[in-house]
Image: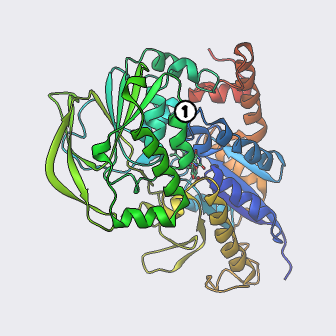
Amino acid sequence: MTSIRPLRVAIVGAGPAGIYAADILSKTDLDVSIDLFERLPAPFGLVRYGVAPDHPRIKQIIVALHKVLSRGDVRLIANVDYGVDVKLEDLRQFYDAVIFSTGSIKDAPLPLPGVDLPGSFGAADFVSWYDGHPDVPRTWPLEARTVAVLGAGNVALDVARILAKHADDLLPTDIPANVYEGLKASPVTDVHVFARRGPAQVKFSPLELRELGHVPDVDIVVYPEDYDFDEGSMAAIESSNQTKQVVKTLTDWTLTDPSAQTASRRIHLHFLHQPDAILGDGKVEALRTERTALQGDGTVRGTGETHEWPVEAVYRAVGYFGSPLPGIPFDQDRGVISNREGRVVDLSGAHLPGVYTTGWIKRGPVGLIGHTKSDASETIRHLVEDVTGVGEGGNPADGDAAGGRTAPHGEPRAVLDFLAERGVEYVEWHEFEVLDEHEKALGVPQGRERIKVVPREEMIAVAKGRTLA
Ligand SMILES: Cc1cc2nc3c(=O)[nH]c(=O)nc-3n(C[C@H](O)[C@H](O)[C@H](O)COP(=O)(O)OP(=O)(O)OC[C@H]3O[C@@H](n4cnc5c(N)ncnc54)[C@H](O)[C@@H]3O)c2cc1C
């Protein structure tokens, strides 16, 4: 088979999933040219805008992602919002295949009386604020002394830790000035984390949990009356080293002598409490929880016994949920693009020719950054099968004589002209690098690795070498 030009592939979403997909695709035998679209003026997705600023080791993953984009064989076209600036029919003009890797940025809904009261927040919004996401307000109302965090995963731990940590202890990180000032003024003293199930059922990673115990001037309080294990719990502890480590850390904390706890702030970890209602007259004044009981297999049932906790703010860290994209089949129940192993499928289950997905928007918002790599491998394997006609399960029409080269305008410049004509101020890799260097330079006088630029207009202006009015 001879082809007249490289296969043109667009990847929409420059988080880890999109960048890994680009990297893996570029290393296949296909003669391919890849453009990576991103809504924000900066790539790296939740590694830049989700991973907590005090997790520099994880943030370092950006170094590896940066290397892929600086090689020059994957073209970044940032500040382009799919659905607003371009749609599938536009992309089909320029690309033979499109891979969606748009992730999830929104909180999963939590139907709870009082959930809309002022003072009730989604964790995703708070995370976006403290990580300097350009699309959220610059200020955050940190007025509460006592706060509840609902959830038993790592995001709940991140939120609790950032709320409880003294702002000065976050100063070595890349937090923007507005975030430092907001946290510095916070009057918080007590952060209560509530988990529905027992200590052996939480989804905390051992490392992240242990880290709580090392936050300066913050004590961890675990209540013996919440500490229950059924047969299902014992089986979980036996079968999972991770669960064993988590339970050991929690057990050590139940044995702490309360008189030794002299910190000015506390994180309380409560188990076997499910949220029942957020209470308050015009604002959050309390959280009501219902005591749950383990049923033998690690699941819980409500007992009818309720507790009221006087808190002034509630953060819901019960998971993220994907958002639909215009023109792309979406599974509303799971919050993912409808797909079969990365091939996007319509209602009848047929593959939408040339359309693929990967990352959190493919399989749901669970799993670590590393998981998006194996995910991308699967999607790219199917794309290659479809283009070459080698392999099973693809759309036979894709493996045609033209080698899947279907786009009428395969010239790489054409899409840039199209965006410019539409007035889209796209940001390319060399321009992002200017922003990247600028952020690093901002950090130098304070001995910090970088200070993030937050407002979108400022990010673009810096990237384009313009001075802001
Ligand atoms: C609060 C939090 C903390 C985390 N901490 C860790 C951790 O410590 N360690 C770890 O391994 N994992 C962590 N994770 C998980 C990790 O962030 C995810 O596994 C990973 O980011 C998922 O990658 P993704 O590329 O699918 O999605 P994302 O990282 O969300 O990337 C999606 C990209 O698509 C872009 N996009 C969205 N819509 C559009 C559109 N319409 N047009 C163009 N572009 C679009 C977004 O701007 C974004 O850049 C954390 C997650 C969260 C939420």
In the rendered image, residue 419, in percent from the top left (x then y), is placed at 65, 46
Whether residue 366 appears in this view of the structure is no
The quadrant of the rendering that contains the N terminus is: bottom right
Label 1 CB, ligand 1: below 8 Å?
yes
**Total number of numbered discs in the rendering:** 1
- Residue tagged by mark 1? 131
Label 1 neighbour load within 10 Å: few <14, some 14-19, many 20+ = many
Asked whether 71 or 460 is in front, the reply is 71
In the rendered image, residue 164, in percent from the top left (x then y), is placed at 44, 27
* Residue depicted at x 70% and y 73%: 381
In the rendered image, residue 310, in percent from the top left (x then y), is placed at 22, 29
| 2 shown above or below 427 | below
Asked whether 359 or 32 is in front, the reply is 359
Residue 353 falls in image quadrant: bottom right
The quadrant of the rendering that contains the C terminus is: top right
Callout 1 secondary element = loop
